[in-house]
Amino acid sequence: GPYLVIAETGYHLNSLFESGGLPGNYKIGGYYQSGDFNNFADPNSTKNGNYGFYILLDQMVYREKGSEKYPHQGLHPFVSLLFAPDSEINTFPFFMNGGLVYRGLIPGRDNDYAGFGIVYGKYSNKIAPTKTQPTEFTPAEITGSEDFEMVLEWMYKIQLTRWLNIQPDVQYIIKPGGTGDIPNALVIVFQMGINI
């Protein structure tokens, strides 16, 4: 059957605490997947094989003074870029996310994380416009013509104990579905994590 092959290489900057520098991770990778994929440009045909590549970066840029006990306490920007160039078979030829994470933002809460992130997906321009029947979840006309979809997210992870955390999360979704036919949406999320 179809197979998926992924290759990745990377560099860990100042990964040892003794190095004294600010830690960072830099990775680049690619993939190839065999098999047949539906062709947006010609719905009656398929294309064989798909490929793409990605870049993953995160780098601490600020470390709080006197944080020897928690050397990762500070500000960590990150970004991921994903490319799937064949727009005839990939819904998102370009996808990215990025943001900022700060560990220990509030004094005395050294293991908490505050974060802001952006997620962006650019739809393929080869997707043919479609119409759907109205349902409980969609308006009467979804025209297709997807452009992009973007999410803004704010979160704060509260580490209550070594094994328990809670995380309130607010997301604002811009252009849901990519068409503009559905209004922007505000989503409020609450998560709880237990490590055993």
Image (spheres, grey):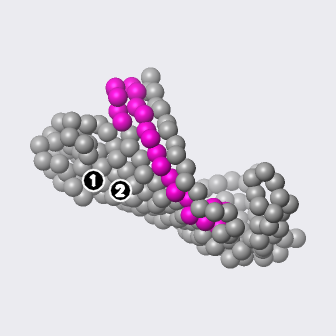
The answer to whether 60 appears left or right of 125 in the picture is left
Question: For numbered disc 2, what is the local secondary structure?
Answer: strand
Would you place residue 69 above or below residue 47 in this image? above
Measuring from the top left, give residue 91's x and y in whole percent: 67, 66
Residue that label 1 marks: 75
Q: Residue furthest right?
A: 44
Q: Residue furthest left?
A: 66
Instruction: Residue 40: tell me if it is visible.
Output: no
User: CB atoms at circles 2 and 1 under 8 Å apart?
Assistant: yes
Quadrant, the C terminus: top left
Three-letter amino acid code of the residue under disc 1: Leu
First reached walking from the N terminus: tag 2 or tag 1: 1
Amino acid type, callout 2: Leu
| Viewer-closest of 68 and 174 | 174
For label 2, the residue is 100
**Bounds of the magenta segment:** 158-178
- Label 1, secondary structure: give it: strand
Please identify the quarter of the rendering in which residue 79 is found.
bottom left
- Please state if 72 lies on the left or on the right of 135 as rendered: left
The reply, left or right, for residue 113 in relation to residue 189 is left
Please indicate whether residue 184 sits to the left or right of residue 116 in the image.
right
For the residue pair 110 and 44, the one nearer the viewer reads as 110
How busy is the neighbourhood of tag 2: few (under 14 within 10 Å), some, or many (20 plus)?
some
Whether residue 96 is in magenta: the answer is no
